[in-house]
Amino acid sequence: MNEYTLLAGDIGATNTKLAFYTAEEGLFKPLFEKTLKNDDFESFDDLLDVYLESTDTSFQAICFGIAGVNILNRIQVTNLGWDIDGTELQKKFSLKGAWLLNDLQALSYAVVNLRDEDLSIIRTGKKVDCAPIAVIAPGTGLGEGFLTWDGEMYQAQSTEGGHVDFGPTNDRQVHLLNYLQKKLPRVSYENVCSGIGIPNLYDFLRDQDYAKEPEWLREKINQVSDSAPVIFNTALDEEKDCELCRLTVELFAEILGAEAGNLALKTLAQGGIYIGGGIPPRILPWLKQDTVIKAITEKDPHTELMSSIPVMVITNPIANLIGAAYFGFMKLSLL
């Protein structure tokens, strides 16, 4: 296996990260890592060709983590529509193997390999060895997965849990649900706990007079196709002092905490809750607030159980690549 070079990928709805890995360099030293914007390409094949043209590196296998449902090693990217077929990629490049994972499977495999410096502790808790582990990741969409112990190692399982019905936990969230039911055919957690959902929270808080929208901010939002980065950046900028943006992030964090707790309760994740995705590392101060810990923990009649579960935020920006590379090398070792 040592002579193999693996092409690993993290393919989301907005961006794609690609990098080469070798067993000699290890999981934390990707080669020729690049992030490409999906909107710049008509298809995944076009994106991949542009990346490969930038290097003359030869490779013998592929493993991609992709935001979508894996059916027979073929995935259509959710919220984008690209169709990626592992069997076709293997034939096209004459590879030893080409394996596709759901993006949360890839992230989950990263969890069992991450170092202390790749994590920010929200709550230490008391980890139970070999117990299930819950993984939730808000990015453009909301991904959810978990890990189970098979007697020898952890195996990652993907879900489409981000698309389950949103369940409010307090009066403000009940009002949010009522508000969105008038605008959407169905309200899922992804609609309120992802990059897609951020504008929904913002509009709700503005329209229901929880806080006023500054004129300069309205003009700025009207100039962009995706308002989520503007809202987050404004909330983080103390000089802007925007209550509406701060309340939006606060509501987002509260809902994320509740759904992270839901996932942990469903899987009995005494091995820990790991929060990944592109958004959480940017809003760590909000995720460490008591309201978020309370949302994770208070699941009567199992509050005591939930209060013992460790909670971490994944801060390594290439965690999905690490997980994909780990799985790819694991598969290569079996050839």
Image (cartoon, rainbow, N blue to C red):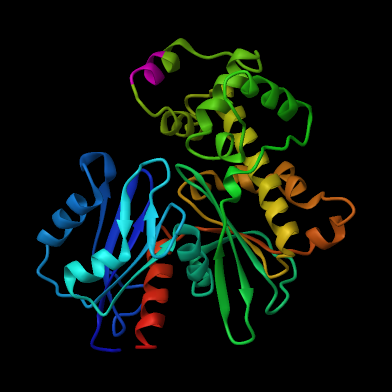
Query: Going 21% across and 40% down the picture, which residue do you hit?
Result: 40
Q: Where residue 108 sits in the image (x, y, percent)? A: 52, 66
Which segment is the magenta one?
219-223
**Left/right of residue 307 with respect to residue 203 in the rendered view:** right
Q: Residue at x 83, y 62 (%)?
A: 305
Q: Residue furthest front?
A: 72
Q: Residue furthest top?
A: 215
Q: Determine the image quadrant of residue 270.
A: bottom right
Whether residue 12 appears in magenta in the rendering, the answer is: no
x, y percentage for residue 175?
72, 22
Residue found at x 66% / y 39%: 165
58 is higher (above) or lower (below) than 101: below
Q: Position of residue 323 (x, y in %)?
A: 43, 69
Q: Is residue 31 visible?
A: no
For residue 49, side relative to residue 193 (left or right): left
Q: Is residue 6 above or below residue 302?
A: below
Is residue 43 among the parts visible in the rendering? yes
Is the N terminus in the top left, top right, bottom left or bottom right quadrant?
Answer: bottom left
Q: Is residue 18 left or right of residue 77?
A: left
Q: Is 324 in front, or is 322?
A: 324
Query: 104 or 118: which is nearer to us?
Result: 104
In the picture, measured across the screen, residue 315 lies left or right of residue 267, that is left
In the rendered image, the quadrant that contains the C terminus is: bottom left
Which SS type dominates the magenta stretch?
A: helix
* Residue at 12%, 65% in the rendered image: 55
Number of numbered discs overlaid on the protein picture: 0
- Pick the front one: 71 or 247: 71
